[in-house]
Amino acid sequence: MGRSPNNRNRIKLFCLGLAVVLLAPLTLSAVTVYTWVDDQGQQHFSQTPPDNLSYRTVTPDPVPAPPEQEIQRRLESLKSGHADYEKRREKKQEQKAVMAEKEAEKKQLCRQASKMHETLTVRRRVVDGDGALLTDPQRAERLKQAAEMMRENC
């Protein structure tokens, strides 16, 4: 079963996030830091050495790699967050489907009400579901019902 481009992108982002979390401590320990004191006596730290000032190189203490348990905890946290995201996304899709169904139902009711209103206003003789002619009060009541349906659904 193939994966959609959206799923592939999510998987790539998940893997990238996991790599960042797991490898961040290793990259931090490889940074070279320069320190110097300016003319006002202010001490500065930077990853680039200053121009025209004497500086010294500071080697930060290496950051120990997280223990296996910490890596597992972070991995589980990422998995849990991803699972929660997927649940929210699926729920949102279900809600959209329900809303689309309700909207389609409203459109159908609107068409029916419009057709009923048109029939009751254009035709002089209208029969009910049993085949009997509608009286003027019955016609007025049905017109009122059609207008109400149109207000609610159109």
Image (cartoon, helix red, strand yellow):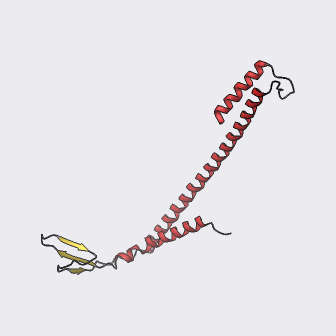
Residue at the image point whose x is 34% and y is 78% from the top: 29
Query: Which one is nearer the viewer's eye here, 45 or 72?
Result: 45
- As drawn, is 48 to the left or to the right of 10? left
Furthest-right residue in this view: 131
Residue at the image point whose x is 76% and y is 23% from the top: 139
Residue 149 position in % (x across, y down): 68, 32
Picture mark count: 0
Q: Is residue 111 visible?
A: yes
In which quadrant of the rendered image does the C terminus lie?
top right
- As drawn, is 148 to the left or to the right of 87? right
Query: Which one is nearer the viewer's eye here, 22 or 44?
Result: 44
- As drawn, is 115 to the left or to the right of 3? right
Residue 114 position in % (x across, y down): 72, 34
- As drawn, is 111 to the left or to the right of 133? left
Furthest-left residue in this view: 40
Q: Is residue 72 visible?
A: no
Residue at the image point whose x is 53% and y is 58% from the top: 85
Query: Which one is nearer the viewer's eye here, 57 or 102?
Result: 102
As displayed, is residue 71 above or below residue 126?
below
Residue 113 position in % (x across, y down): 72, 33
Residue 66 position in % (x across, y down): 40, 74
Query: Which one is nearer the viewer's eye here, 64 or 102?
Result: 102
In which quadrant of the rendered image does the N terminus lie?
bottom right
Q: Quadrant of residue 33?
A: bottom left
